[in-house]
Amino acid sequence: MIKGVRGAPDILPDESGKWQALESVARDVLDRYGYAEIRTPIFERTELFVRGIGEATDIVEKEMYTFDDRGGESLTLRPEATASMIRAYAEHNLGAKSSLVKLYLIGPMFRHERPQSGRFRQFHQVDVEAIGLPGPAVDVEVVALLHHLLEAWGLRGMRLHLNSIGDPACRPRYREAFLEYLGAHREALCGDCHIRMTKNPLRVLDCKQPGCRAVASEAPALSGYLCDACRAHFSEVCASLDALRIAYEVDERLVRGLDYYTRTTFEFLNPALGAQNAVAGGGRYDGLVEELGGRPTPSIGFAVGEERILTSLAVQAGPVETPPITGVYVATAGAVELRPAMELTQILRRRGLRAALDLEGRSLKGQLRQANKDRFRYSVILGTEELARGRVTLKDMIGGAQQEVPLAEVADRLAALPEREIV
Ligand SMILES: [Zn+2]
Ligand SMILES: [Zn+2]
């Protein structure tokens, strides 16, 4: 038997309900904040991600699923959603209709990760982008939205880390000071960080090697180098979050390595998850649209890992909820043919009820046992003698009471029951 690819798990029937619930809560909350769904293809021209994520990143260097299609063009399965969403925004000129365009995308992403590290090669994200305004009010609304979303999913104990990474006016000065500091501690850094120093020095702050971490912890802080405009932007964001009573911690180590990221950067962490504890992260990227060839357009967004959310919920969960008892099981007794049962079942389903019938030729006793097992609230039993009189037996599967009712009325009566009784 051929097996699935490692790191690309199936979502099985008894798990898919959790995914549906997660995504329907997301759609509901995003709708309230005025976000509209966009669905972009799962593959794009490779160049989009090389420019949109950055050449000197692990994603582009090591993790992309890149292939030549039959026409010889290099394509890549999307490793994240922002670049695709920005491409679609610019390509379809969505900014012409509105100065602030709010988009979300829910779907699978693909990265060639090592599955043994607990990461997936196909994983799922909810990605949110607010395109068009420089903030800081938009920044605050986006962080508040993410905060609300995590709460709506039922997550507890999340911690918000917040930072400003400056902009092209002030970051070069910091970069210079940071490089000078790194140069003085070169021997303590790992080989990868020596390469990062030339390509993308801020990424040294992300390195997990103990030597590099020690150097990074003593490094000059970016906050000391922010220009007045960046400083004002950040304090406005902080003051508004205070006013909304959203708790945060300023985290000077929270940086993004790419030049088009600007100012506000944030991450929600779940301390209960251990080493990989970020459940959602985002930030402002005022230079990205231009980097992809569009008009300069300030934007901010975030991505939430759906697997991380479900793991977080599982870690904090109490006992598993049993599904409610609902709907109608249509059973046949004795020599009754299946056809009238099928007809009634279809009628009930069209009336909006969950309904089932036996397709396996079980005895009446076996059918009622199945009805209990599948958590049906009522059974309708079709017997030869009653059916000849145009009547059926309606059985309450909780109380056990049963009564004869006309076949012609049974669907109306069941559909008219109060929702808590039947749906
Ligand atoms: Zn290092
Ligand atoms: Zn600045």
Image: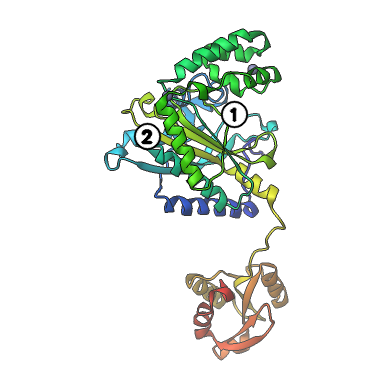
- Residue under pointer 2: 134
Residue 266's x, y, as percent?
53, 35
Which residue is at 69% across, 75% downward? 368
Reply above or below: 256 against 21.
above
Query: 205 or 350, which lies in front?
Result: 205
Q: Earlier in the sequence, mark 2 or mark 1?
A: 1
Q: Amino acid at mark 2?
A: Pro
Determine crowd level at label 1: few under 14, some 14-19, many 20+ residues with C-alpha closer than 10 A: some
Q: Quadrant of the C terminus?
A: bottom right
Identify the image quadrant of the N terminus: top right
**Residue pointed to by mark 1:** 112
- Tell me which residue sits at (51%, 77%) in the image: 415
The x, y position of residue 84, in whole percent, is: 42, 34
Q: Position of residue 157 (x, y in %)?
A: 64, 46
Query: Residue lying furthest bottom in this view?
Result: 389
> In the depicted view, which residue is nearer to us: 101 or 111?
101
Q: Secondary structure at mark 2?
A: loop
**Foreground label between 2 and 1:** 2
Quick one: label 2, few (<14), some, or many (20+) residues within 10 Å? some
| Number of numbered callouts drawn | 2
Cα distance between the residues tagged 2 and 1: 34 Å
Q: Is residue 177 left or right of residue 88?
A: right
Q: Nearer the viewer, residue 262 or 378?
A: 262
Disc 1 is placed on an element classified as: loop
Q: Quadrant of ligand 2?
A: top left
Looking at numbered disc 1 in the image, what kind of residue is underneath it?
Answer: His
**Would residue 146 be visible to someone looking at this image?**
yes
